[in-house]
């Protein structure tokens, strides 16, 4: 059988069901191609993509500049491993460290790998620089976090679906409530063996839970005060998604490339993935300054594919697109418009309790229980009406279109969303 033999969406779904592991529960849409904010299914039905591959496709589907970079580099050399140098990696590392203003970059592939890398760096730094006794370092994490699904990461997850029957769990983590600086301060004062605090500036998988404006700056300040590494997981929130280059920039009003305004809380360790490649290739990275990153020596961490020439070329072009097309500014403006329009709808309807988010990372909370099927049913109806979104945590629907969306397209989508929601009005 070839791809050309698949003539219907149901046929493709049946093949996955029979031959694939059942580790996902996708919406019944079988996509074959994408361009900009649109995707098409096997039957050639056209949809607005309002998930963007969990914010990996910030630059839009099949962005020609990114695809050209992928193609051109692939024709030359795609993989050398790190046993040898290649002529693209150093250029990329220089470009990205100057772009985000850090001394060093450690290249990886997936987001979870990047988080695992940050955990290893912070522990080694704690032993060699801070003087914590070996094996006693603790890392602070926050309730309802989502940093991936590796064995270490699920060890500090609240999601029992991700945890149950996957133990024994990895020790070394202290969990505190999100958006609670007092709880964080208490733990820092009581425990001298804290290596770092790992945090999402906005909790995406938890339903785009957006903390108080002063929470992230307080986290940064407390980390500084207690000589603890402030580690920002910007895999989903970063690279223009929230209306700023990074979510730790806060509610900035940058007009060009990141201006590091007063609202910026600089991480000690920055974790990136997803949109770092515009969705064209698996690329992730950890950035830090020399006094942190230099604890990693040859043979202590690596990846066969990490830092390969294709990844490096793709990442540079993906970041150039963000800057050249002013996608952070577009996300900021249209995100404000989106929440304003949804709030107008909420004033006169009871199917939605609230809309929250920043930039073009938003979510609505459906007025039903987490174990109800309402949010799923709404997403199926949205699909029928030409827009793809997905529930999270049962009664929350996340909306995250590619950042290349125009105002006209956004208003068309608002119309689709509100007309669909009206059909579910109680």
Image: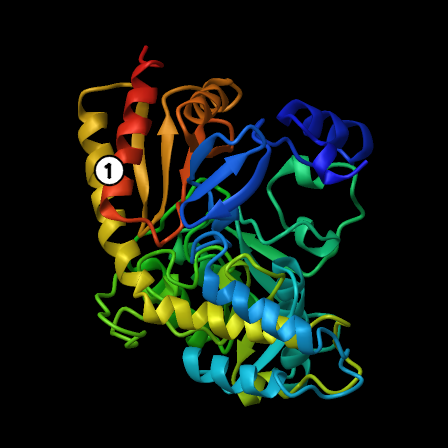
Q: Residue at x 62, y 46 (%)?
A: 157
Question: In the image, is 213 to the left or to the right of 385?
Answer: left
Tell me where residue 253 sits by quadrant: bottom left
Q: Residue at x 43, y 76 (%)?
A: 224
Instruction: Name the image quarter holding the C terminus.
Output: top left
239 is higher (above) or lower (below) than 195: above
304 is higher (above) or lower (below) than 156: below
Residue 285, percent from left and from top:
58, 71
Residue 95, percent from left and from top:
48, 83
Q: Residue at x 31, y 13 (%)?
A: 425
Q: Is residue 195 visible?
A: no
Q: Is residue 209 visible?
A: yes
Q: Residue at x 41, y 53 (%)?
A: 202
Question: In the image, is 274 to the left or to the right of 219?
Answer: right
Residue 131, percent from left and from top:
65, 84
Question: In the image, is 120 to the left or to the right of 90?
Answer: right
């Amino acid at each position: 059988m070839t791809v050309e033999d698949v003539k219907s969406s149901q046929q493709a779904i049946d093949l996955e069901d029979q031959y694939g592991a059942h580790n996902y529960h996708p919406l019944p849409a079988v996509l074959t191609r994408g361009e900009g904010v649109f995707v098409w299914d096997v039957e050639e039905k056209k949809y607005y993509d309002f998930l963007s591959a969990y914010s990996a496709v910030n630059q839009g589907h099949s962005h020609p500049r990114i695809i050209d970079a992928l193609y051109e580099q692939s024709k030359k050399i795609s993989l050398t491993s790190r046993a040898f140098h290649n002529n693209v990696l150093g250029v990329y590392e220089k470009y990205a460290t100057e772009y985000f203003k850090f001394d060093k970059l450690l290249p990886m592939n997936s987001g979870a790998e990047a988080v695992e890398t940050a955990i290893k760096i912070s522990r080694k730094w704690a032993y060699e620089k801070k003087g914590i006794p070996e094996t006693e370092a603790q890392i602070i994490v926050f309730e309802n976090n989502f940093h991936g699904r590796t064995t270490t990461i699920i060890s500090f997850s609240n999601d029992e679906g991700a945890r149950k029957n996957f133990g024994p769990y990895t020790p070394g983590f202290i969990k505190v409530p999100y958006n609670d600086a007092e709880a964080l301060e208490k733990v820092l004062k009581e425990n001298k063996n804290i290596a770092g605090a790992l945090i999402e500036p906005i909790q995406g998988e938890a339903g785009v839970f957006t903390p108080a404006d002063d929470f992230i700056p307080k986290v940064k300040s407390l980390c500084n005060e207690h000589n603890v590494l402030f580690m920002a997981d910007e895999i989903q929130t970063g690279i223009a998604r929230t209306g700023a280059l990074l979510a730790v920039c806060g509610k900035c009003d940058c007009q060009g490339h990141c201006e590091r305004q007063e609202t910026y809380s600089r991480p000690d360790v920055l974790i990136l993935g997803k949109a770092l490649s515009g969705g064209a290739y698996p690329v992730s990275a950890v950035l830090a300054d020399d006094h942190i990153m230099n604890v990693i020596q040859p043979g202590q961490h690596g990846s066969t594919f990490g830092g390969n020439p294709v990844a490096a070329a793709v990442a540079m072009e993906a970041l150039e697109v963000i800057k050249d097309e002013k996608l952070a500014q577009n996300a900021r403006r249209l995100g404000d418009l989106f929440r304003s329009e949804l709030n107008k709808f909420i004033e006169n309807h009871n199917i939605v309790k609230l809309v929250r988010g920043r930039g073009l990372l938003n979510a609505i909370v459906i007025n039903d229980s987490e174990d109800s099927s309402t949010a799923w049913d709404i997403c199926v109806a949205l699909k029928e009406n030409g827009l793809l979104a997905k529930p999270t945590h049962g009664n929350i629907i996340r909306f995250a279109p590619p950042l290349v969306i125009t105002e006209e397209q956004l208003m068309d989508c608002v119309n689709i969303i509100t007309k669909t929601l009206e059909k579910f009005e109680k």
